[in-house]
Amino acid sequence: MAENAEAWARCNACKEPIQHGALYWVCSVSTCNQKRTGLRFCSVSCWEVHLPDARHREAWAVEKVAGDPPAKAAVKPKAASSAPGGGKRRIIRSTDSAATSTASAPTEVLIVASRLKDYIRSQSGFNTSDKALGPLSDIVRRVADEAIRHARSEGRQTVLDRDIPDDS
């Protein structure tokens, strides 16, 4: 019981104690990190337990050290490794995320969901699943990559409307 008396906090999933100086993980989504919520997890697998209930569109686990003062701003990955007194911090994305990519380019959704849903509803009366945004963003990326190649082949560093293929 003496071990629990020195615990810094408890894991929100398995209720195991998190000791001072130990690694723990928090969710990257702001609603999970509010003062009243303050979710903390002792492992990435415990963090993944909360994902089905949280229903985040995109989330990752952020590694922290117990007892560190809370950050006042979001920690960017480049600045995280050199955080004074905070130790190293790593960002771990969920393994079940559809946003895993081997390319160095970002894989965020490029489509404005509300505009697309409004358009589809006005044209057909259909609803639109959020899962349709990822594949449509991939199509936009492919067209943009083709436009970049065309602009580069003409010696420009600006993508113009004429660089976008007509068949898209």
Image (cartoon, helix red, strand yellow):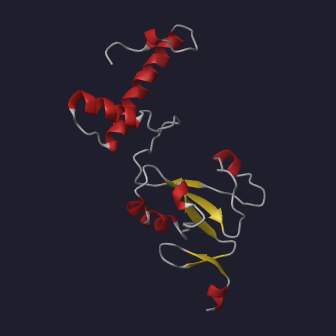
Image x and y of residue 126, in percent: 22, 36
* Left or right: residue 133 compared with residue 27: left
* Left or right: residue 151 compared with residue 77: left
Q: Is residue 28 visible?
A: no
Query: In the image, is residue 6 above or below residue 28?
Result: below
Image x and y of residue 38, in percent: 57, 66
Residue 125 appears in which quarter of the rendering?
top left
Who's the residue at 61% across and 55% down the image?
90
* Left or right: residue 155 compared with residue 78: left
Q: Residue furthest right?
A: 84
Q: Residue furthest bottom?
A: 1
Query: In the image, is residue 99 above or below residue 151?
Result: below
Q: How many marks?
A: 0
Query: In the image, is residue 124 above or below residue 72?
Result: above
**In the rendered view of the protein, which quadrant contains the C terminus?**
top left
Q: Is residue 153 visible?
A: yes
Who's the residue at 56% across and 14% down the image?
158
Residue 28 appears in which quarter of the rendering?
bottom right
Image x and y of residue 47, in percent: 49, 64
In this view of the protein, which residue sits in the foreground, 84 or 129?
Answer: 129
In this view of the protein, which residue sits in the foreground, 132 or 93?
Answer: 132
Image x and y of residue 103, in percent: 49, 36
Who's the residue at 67% across and 45% down the image?
78
Who's the residue at 72% across and 64% down the image?
69
* Left or right: residue 65 compared with residue 154: right
In this view of the protein, which residue sits in the foreground, 22 or 119?
Answer: 119
